[in-house]
Image: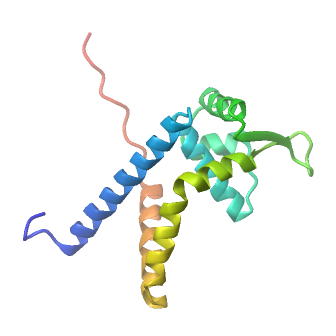
């Protein structure tokens, strides 16, 4: 980093480095457990929804992952074959299929990511309430900025 780089840009580059490291840990987890990296993202989406009390249908999962119907079905089928996910009928509307992460997948994730989670929670334990709220506000804001970005244009046509 240069001397003239702003503190805001240094924080942005640090955030980017954290996301790269986290992506590497996710890829290692996927490879070690015979999964595709998209499968790991799917499990994360499903676990986040579960924590939020949100039911997830295949369509909602596909939308959150940016996949079409066929791609979503492939992810669900792979995770189901591996025993990480179950398709269950919605008790309120039996026509609807919901996706649930199996307990074994949660245990597998805890075994792999537990030290990262514990280390991060421990780090945050050293922050006071004001600092913790600033971190939460910053990360939530970054998430919102990313979610609000327009879709990139399609790749330019190549001459044949």
Residue 27 image point, x, y percent: 45, 41
Residue 8 image point, x, y percent: 24, 72
- Left or right: where 2 falls relative to 91: left
Residue at 62% x, 46% y is 43
- Establish if 33 lies above or below 111: above
- Left or right: where 7 falls relative to 28: left
Residue at 62% x, 33% y is 75
For the residue pair 114 and 142, the one nearer the viewer reads as: 114
- Left or right: where 54 falls relative to 88: left
- Establish if 100 lies above or below 37: below
For the residue pair 12 and 151, the one nearer the viewer reads as: 12
Q: How is the image coloured?
A: rainbow
- Establish if 103 lies above or below 131: above
Q: Quadrant of residue 15?
A: bottom left
Quadrant for the C terminus in the image: top left
Residue 123 image point, x, y percent: 43, 76
Quadrant for the N terminus in the image: bottom left
């Amino acid at each position: 980093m240069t001397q003239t780089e702003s503190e805001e840009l240094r924080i942005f580059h640090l955030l980017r480095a954290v996301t790269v490291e986290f992506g590497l840990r996710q890829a290692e987890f996927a490879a070690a457990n015979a999964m595709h990296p998209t499968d790991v993202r799917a499990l994360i989406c499903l676990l986040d929804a579960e924590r939020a009390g949100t039911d997830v249908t295949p369509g909602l999962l596909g939308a959150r992952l940016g996949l079409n119907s066929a791609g979503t079905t492939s992810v669900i089928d792979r995770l189901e074959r591996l025993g990480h996910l179950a398709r269950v009928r919605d008790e309120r509307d039996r026509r609807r299929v919901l996706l649930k992460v199996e307990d074994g997948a949660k245990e597998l994730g805890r075994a792999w990511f537990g030290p990262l989670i514990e280390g991060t929670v421990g780090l945050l334990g050293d922050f006071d309430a004001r600092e913790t709220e600033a971190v939460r506000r910053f990360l939530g804001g970054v998430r919102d900025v990313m979610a609000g970005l327009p879709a990139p244009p399609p790749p330019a046509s190549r001459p044949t």
